[in-house]
Amino acid sequence: MRLPGLTGVATLAWPLLVWLAVRHHVALLLPLALLFLLRGWLLRHQAGPFNALSQRLALAGAALCLFSLLPGQQHLLLWYPVAVNGALLLLFGSSLFSGIPLVEQLARLREPDLPPRAVRYTRRVTQIWCLFFILNGTIATFTCLHGDMALWTLWNGLLSYLLIGLLMAGEWLVRQRIRRAA
């Protein structure tokens, strides 16, 4: 596996790695911080709407790992999913008020001349993602405050990923139906 793939897998496996670090191997914190820093460094020359955000989140992940090395502060690791949801909410939400919504920007990469109906649809999808990030971030915050590692790991390591996949699949199905109807 190449280095960018390894850092991507580590990012996706974050909840499991946090669980291991908090429950069993605090020594994992430094390698996790280094993986986040490496991810940020690898992203520095890539383009795309999520690149700058991904770099900042990599730095946030590294910082959370390093601060978690302080005595009694391992719980700081748990806040990474909250930071991710907050950052994505800001990215998607701000695009609703400053020009072209993010989902429309992504759609225009494949289809530059979107009809007005598609523009309205992409705005609605951007709003739905914002709602998702609010709900997911709220539940992630609750799991942090609740302090139950099993609950935190279940939500942030499984259920939220399943919901993201369901939302993406559902949106794709709706989009296909709309395209066929047009």
Image (cartoon, helix red, strand yellow):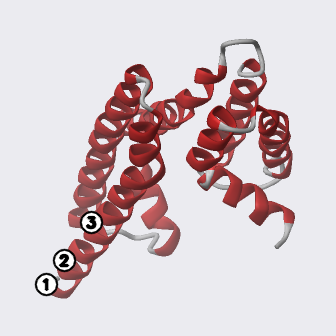
Kindly state the secondary structure of the residue where label 3 is placed.
Answer: helix
Q: CA distance from mark 3 to mark 2?
A: 9 Å
Q: Identify the disc placed on residue 97.
A: none
The image position of residue 43, as x and y in percent, is: 78, 50
Determine which residue is flagged by label 1: 181
Determine which residue is flagged by label 2: 178
Name which residue type carries label 1. Answer: Ala
Name which residue type carries label 3. Answer: Ala
Q: CA distance from mark 1 to mark 3?
A: 12 Å
Kindly state the secondary structure of the residue where label 2 is placed.
Answer: helix
The image position of residue 84, as x and y in percent, is: 52, 37
> Residue sitting at 61 percent across and 22 percent down?
76
Contact (Cβ within 8 Å) of mark 2 with mark 1? yes
| Residue 23 visible from this viewpoint | yes
Determine which residue is flagged by label 3: 118
> Residue sitting at 32 percent across and 57 percent down?
163
Q: Quick check: 119 above or below 35? A: below
